[in-house]
Amino acid sequence: QRQLVESGGGLVQSGGSLRLSCTARGFTFASYAVGWFRQAPGKEREWVSTFSNQDGTTYYAKSVKGRFTISVDNANTASLQMNSLKPEDTAVYYCAAGWDFTMADVARENEYENWGQGTQVTVSS
C-alpha cells in the first residue's frame, strides 16, 4: 500500500524557518507530481506548492511564492523549505502525490490520489 508521511512541523517565531519532509512508502515519486496543501482552523484546505517529476517544474501559490521552496530530494523524499514565516502560515500541512500523466490542475485536491496525515505548523507573533 502506498503511504505518505510528513514530518518537520513545529512552533516557530514570525520570520523564522521550517523544513517539512514527505516520505513515500511503498512507492517512489517517479512519474508523480508532489504537492503541498495546508488547512488553517476554520478554513478550507488550500493549495501551497507542487513539484512535477516529469520535467522538474515547480508551482507556487501567490501567498507563498518567494518564501517557500519545494523540492524532491530523492526517489522517496520531498521537502518544503519555508522561510520568512508569517502567523497566517499557521496550519496543518499535508503532502500529496498525484499521477503526473493525468494531472490537469496542480492546485485541485482531487488531482492527488495519495495523502499524508498532516503535520502542524504554528507561527507565533
Image (spheres, helix red, strand yellow):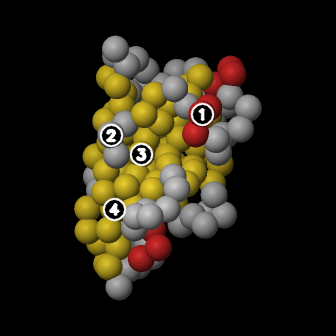
**What is the distance, in whole Å, between disc 4 and disc 1 at their CAs?**
23 Å
Q: Which residue is mark 1?
A: 110
Type of residue at label 1?
Asn
Sequence-first tag of 3 and 2: 3
Residue drawn at point x = 43 percent, y = 21 percent: 28
Residue drawn at point x = 51 percent, y = 52 percent: 45
Q: Does the rendering let one see residue 42?
A: yes
Which of the labelled discs sits on residue 121, or is there none? 4
In contact (CB < 8 Å): disc 4 and disc 1: no
**What is the distance, in whole Å, between disc 1 and disc 3 at their CAs?**
14 Å
In contact (CB < 8 Å): disc 3 and disc 2: yes
Residue 103 higher or lower than 47, as above or below: above
Q: Position of residue 91 (x, y in %)?
A: 40, 61
Q: Nearer the viewer's eye, disc 4 or disc 1? A: 1
Q: Position of residue 114 (x, y in %)?
A: 46, 28
Label 1 Cα neighbours within 10 Å, binned few <14 / some 14-19 / many ≥20 = few
Type of residue at label 3?
Tyr
